[in-house]
Image (tube, rainbow, N blue to C red):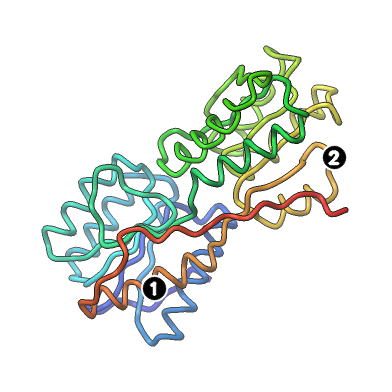
């Protein structure tokens, strides 16, 4: 699925954050499918959450002389130098899902993460009846996650009887599991956990059960991957997921790259409104 045609000097280089997550696999497929449909060639590289590899991949695209680079940064701050290098070489950059902090790119395409975070906070408040202690599993290196966590915090702040008692980083599912276990041990009265992504939420759900708190803690995720959607339908602890739409993002990224390459103007930001998935009645 991640295979792509070799780029020529006039085509598109794509650097994605990972291939270890269904969201990014769907994004990669959408990019590849839209490129084939529009008869443009892309070369895709996967950083697998390694900033140094991503910087090397971008440098490779610069040397090859692609016209446009589509990237999902591993690190919102760390990718700034690579964007500057590409732009200095006359290459337009489009960011997808994760913005580059401090960079002015041709266009940013991604979920309105702040709005999604607000939706998650509102759902949590509704599930808790407006009171209780909650925790957040975070990934603060990535600006899109910072935005969704800020949205969640702002929504929760409107409910004075809900308190955020713990925020810890758990990037992988294994890390999120350990973090959730620690949170629940330190704060056994936690009534809700917001996972920055579905992996974090699914790990939190496991931790809730292993702590003997099944049915007593509400867990909300963010992404909308099939495993999480199924968990919302079948697992009493998973009460909802904020849905992203990687298929729309991938298609829009390629279409925007084609316009940029043709010298057309494109919006600086192209937000995609997230959905909310809750248990079916």
Q: Nearer the viewer, residue 280 or 8?
A: 280
Q: Residue shown at 56%/64% (left/top)?
A: 26
Q: What x and y, as percent, mark residue 46?
A: 41, 58
Q: What x and y, as percent, mark residue 21?
A: 57, 53
Rate crowding at label 2 as few (under 14), some (14 to 19) or many (20 or more) other CA atoms within 10 Å.
some
Q: Which residue is mark 1?
A: 254
The numbered mark at residue 232 is: none
Q: Quadrant of residue 71?
A: bottom left
Rate crowding at label 1 as few (under 14), some (14 to 19) or many (20 or more) other CA atoms within 10 Å.
many
Q: Residue shown at 22%/71% (left/top)?
A: 66
Disc 1/disc 2 C-alpha distance (Å): 39 Å
Q: Secondary structure at mark 1?
A: helix
- Can you say whether 32 is above or below 217 in the image? below
Q: What x and y, as percent, mark residue 147?
A: 45, 40
Q: Which residue is mark 2?
A: 236
Q: Nearer the viewer, residue 209 or 262?
A: 262
Q: Secondary structure at mark 2?
A: loop
Q: Quadrant of residue 217?
A: top right
Q: Residue shown at 39%/46% (left/top)?
A: 74
- Can you say whether 62 is above or below 241 in the image? below
Q: Is residue 105 left or right of residue 127?
A: left
Q: Earlier in the sequence, mark 1 or mark 2?
A: 2
Q: Residue shown at 54%/68% (left/top)?
A: 247
Q: What x and y, as percent, mark residue 17?
A: 43, 52
Q: Is residue 204 left or right of residue 16?
A: right
Q: Is residue 140 left or right of residue 83?
A: right
Point out the residue furthest to the top here.
186
């Amino acid at each position: 699925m991640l295979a792509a045609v070799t780029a020529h000097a006039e085509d598109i280089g794509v650097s994605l954050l990972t291939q270890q997550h269904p969201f990014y696999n769907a994004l990669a497929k959408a990019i590849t499918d839209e490129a084939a449909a529009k008869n443009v060639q892309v070369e895709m590289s996967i950083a697998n959450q390694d900033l140094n590899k991503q910087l090397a991949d971008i440098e490779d695209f610069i040397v090859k002389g692609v016209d446009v680079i589509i990237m999902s940064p591993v690190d919102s701050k760390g990718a700034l130098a690579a964007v500057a290098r590409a732009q200095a070489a006359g290459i337009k950059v489009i960011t997808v899902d994760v913005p580059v902090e401090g960079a002015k790119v041709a266009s940013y395409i991604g979920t309105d993460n702040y709005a999604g975070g607000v939706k998650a906070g509102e759902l949590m408040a509704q599930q808790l009846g407006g009171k209780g202690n909650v925790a957040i599993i975070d990934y603060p290196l990535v600006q899109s996650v910072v935005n969704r966590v800020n949205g969640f915090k702002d929504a929760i702040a409107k409910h004075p009887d809900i308190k955020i008692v713990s925020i810890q980083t758990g990037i992988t599912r294994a890390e999120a599991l350990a973090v959730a276990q620690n949170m629940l041990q330190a704060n056994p009265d936690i009534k809700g956990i917001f996972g920055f992504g579905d992996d974090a939420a699914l790990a939190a759900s496991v931790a809730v059960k292993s702590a003997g708190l099944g049915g007593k803690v509400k867990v909300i995720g963010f992404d909308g991957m099939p495993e999480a959607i199924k968990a919302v339908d079948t697992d009493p602890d998973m009460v909802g997921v904020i849905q992203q739409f990687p298929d729309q993002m991938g298609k829009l990224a390629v279409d925007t790259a084609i316009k940029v390459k043709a010298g057309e103007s494109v919006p600086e930001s192209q937000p995609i409104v997230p959905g909310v998935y809750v248990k079916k009645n």
